[in-house]
Image (cartoon, grey):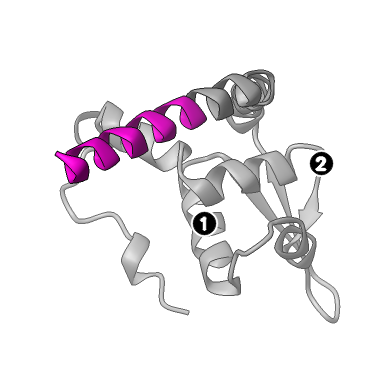
Amino acid sequence: MSQRNIQVPVGYDLEEDCPFQEVLERVASKWVVQVILASSAGPVRFTELESAIDGISRRMLTLTLRRLERDGLVTRTVYPCVPPRVEYTATEPALELQEAFQALADWALRHRPTIAAARRVYDNRVSAEAEDSILS
């Protein structure tokens, strides 16, 4: 698979050209969160990640792992054996992110009932308003 899509352009200064928004978008993406959570317990193989992350394609997992490795959030270790064995491990910055992701997941679980209730109230109100506008 080509690595063309993740190469750094010539003259690209990471200190200047890696804006805050880009970093946030990268670490908050759906697959990155799941890969970091799945790899934070220790070394994990590609197939283990693939089966642990529901709905991710092999291609998307490969791209996500390459981006995480490039960003220093995952280390890739290749063992010289037949067949080759490759393991991925979350780095210290990724483990710090994992703590933040866990806090966010805990928040989401705690507030799920509140959010569900708010959605019901909103949907009922919007539905009633739509009925009123049809009847008027």
Helix, strand or loop at mark 2: loop
Would you say 67 lies left or right of 17 here? right
Q: Nearer the viewer, residue 41 or 130?
A: 130
Residue identified by numbered label 1: 64
Would you say 111 lies left or right of 1 here? right
Residue 101 image point, x, y percent: 61, 28
Helix, strand or loop at mark 1: helix
Residue identified by numbered label 2: 42
User: From which residue to which does the magenta span run?
Assistant: 119-136
Q: Main secondary structure of the magenta part?
A: helix
Identify the residue at horizontal 57%, vertical 41% (top origin): 33
Identify the residue at horizontal 15%, vertical 48% (top origin): 11
Residue type for callout 2:
Gly
Indicate whether 82 appears above or below 113: below
Lower position in the chain sequence, tag 2 or tag 1? 2
Residue 82 image point, x, y percent: 85, 81
Identify the residue at horizontal 80%, vertical 61% (top origin): 48
> Alpha carbon of mark 2 to alpha carbon of mark 1: how far?
18 Å
The label shown at residue 22 is none
Residues under numbered marks 2 and 1 in contact, where contact means CB atoms less than 8 Å apart: no
Q: Is residue 132 magenta?
A: yes
Would you say 48 lies left or right of 97 here? right
Where does the C terminus fall, quadrant-wise? top left
Indicate whether 117 appears above or below 62: above
Residue type for callout 1:
Thr
Specify whether residue 60 is in view. Answer: yes
Residue 22 image point, x, y percent: 30, 37
Q: Would you identify the image quadrant in which residue 5 lies?
A: bottom left
